[in-house]
Image (cartoon, rainbow, N blue to C red):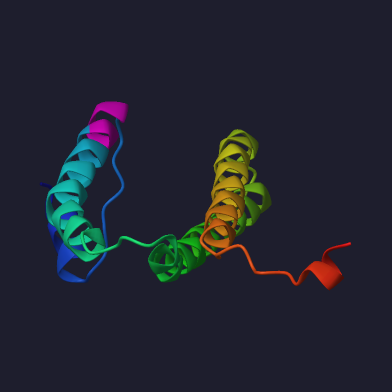
Amino acid sequence: MSVSAFLARLQGKRPAYDTTAEVMQLLDAQYRRIHDSRLPVHLQRTAHLEEALAFQPGLVDARAAAADLALYAEALITAARSNGHGELAENLNDVAESLHEAVSKLAEAAHATVPIPQVPLVHAA
């Protein structure tokens, strides 16, 4: 680690890397860390879920997190475009679209947890 990277970390900043190999290594290590630390937590928190309705709060929370990521991607697109990084903005566009789709799919899943309401026959027509 370079001195500037070390100083950046002391200030709570993350360094940017110059090669795709370094970025790949960073992303792989990041995923392993998240997987190893968060998957057991998620499995423990969801182990008790049985009824479909019990899934709803987690789905609503997941949708909120995905929506926040989608908005962050939109902000990154704006920053990339305003700084002349058109290709990066286009890549981020795909990311934002995927995140917005995830938001939509999570909303569908949350709706699917609602029990079918009992509609009186008089109102069913």
Q: Write the residue at 22% across / 36% down.
A: 28
In this view of the protein, which residue sits in the foreground, 65 or 2?
65
Question: Mainly helix, strand or loop, the magenta region?
Answer: helix
Position in image of residue 112 (x %, y %):
56, 56
Position in image of residue 99 (x %, y %):
55, 49
**Is 21 part of what is drawn in magenta?**
yes
Position in image of residue 12 (x %, y %):
23, 69
Position in image of residue 37 (x %, y %):
13, 56
Left or right: residue 62 compared with residue 99? left
Q: Write the residue at 43% across / 60% down.
A: 52
The region drawn magenta spans 20-24
Q: Write the residue at 57% across / 55% down.
A: 103
Quadrant placement of the C terminus: bottom right
> Looking at the picture, does residue 111 appear above or below residue 102?
below
Q: Residue furthest right?
A: 125
Dividing the picture into quadrants, the one containing residue 98 is top right
Residue 114 visible somewhere in the drawing: yes
Q: Write the residue at 53% across / 61% down.
A: 110
- The number of numbered discs placed on residues in the rendered structure image is 0
Dividing the picture into quadrants, the one containing residue 49 is bottom left
In this view of the protein, which residue sits in the foreground, 105 or 98?
105
**Is 78 part of what is drawn in magenta?**
no
Left or right: residue 115 compared with residue 61? right
Left or right: residue 121 compared with residue 29? right
Dividing the picture into quadrants, the one containing residue 122 is bottom right
Left or right: residue 113 compared with residue 33? right
Residue 4 visible somewhere in the drawing: no
